Image (spheres, rainbow, N blue to C red):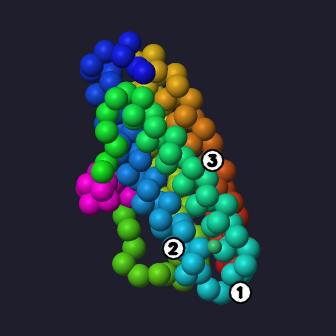
Amino acid sequence: MTTHYSPEARHEIVDALNGFLADTTIIYYKTHAFHWNVEGPNFYGVHLMFETFYKDLWESMDDIAERIRAFSEKVFPNLEMLLQHASIAELETAPSIDVMVQNLRDDYIALSKKAMAIGTIAEKHGDLVTSDMMIQRSAFLEKAAWMLQATVKSSS
Ligand SMILES: [Fe+2]
């Protein structure tokens, strides 16, 4: 329970976490779909790299959602509502392997910046649990973005 936080703090943190959950869900699905749809000479390595990423993103969704529940707020009950709160763009078609890698790199960096911003909001309210969670998310996303960037270099 987190009833020791002020109503303003609770509202601000939960609002930010809901947006983060929405964006993580979009990026999770995009990464998993890329894992399925990827083609090309680097297929196997990229296919497996995407798998390690989507598994981490999937597990993180549970932690983020349960942090929202610790504030006694409900998580999006359907994907339609979730999509309305997402800021990460979806793709209309399955792109080439190079575009997949570059698109995920940019999305992961964008989400990492968001995690840092949410961590700062949480810290301002003394919520070091959420802040710590966001630092961990950012650490994963920045490392994954580096791996994607290294892949772009080797394939061009
Ligand atoms: Fe698979």
Tell me the distance, in whole angstroms, between the alpha carbons under discs 1 and 3.
26 Å
Q: Is mark 1 within 8 Å of ligand 1?
A: no
Residue lying furthest top: 4
Query: In this image, 18 relative to 102: left or right?
Result: left
Q: Is residue 135 magenta?
A: no
Residue under the point 39% across and 34% down = 69
Observer able to see residue 149: no
For marks 2 and 1, the one nearer the N-term is 2
Q: Which residue is mark 2?
A: 33
- Rendered image: mark on residue 5: none
Q: Quadrant of residue 32?
A: bottom right
Q: Nearer the viewer, residue 57 or 94?
A: 57
Q: Within the displayed image, which quadrant is ligand 1 positioned in?
A: bottom right
Tell me the distance, in whole angstroms, between the alpha carbons under discs 2 and 1.
18 Å
Residue under the point 54% across and 46% down = 60
Label 1 element class: loop
Residue range highlighted in magenta: 78-88
Against 20, is 120 above or below?
above
Query: In this image, 110 relative to 53: left or right?
Result: left
Q: Amino acid at mark 2?
A: Ala
Q: Which residue is mark 1?
A: 41
Closer to the camera: disc 2 or disc 1?
A: 2
The 10 Å Cα crowd at callout 1, few under 14, some 14 to 19, many 20 or more, is few
For marks 2 and 3, the one nearer the N-term is 2
Q: Amino acid at mark 1?
A: Pro
The 10 Å Cα crowd at callout 2, few under 14, some 14 to 19, many 20 or more, is some
Residue under the point 32% across and 59% down = 79
For marks 1 and 3, the one nearer the N-term is 1
Closer to the camera: disc 2 or disc 3?
A: 2
- Rendered image: mark on residue 140: 3
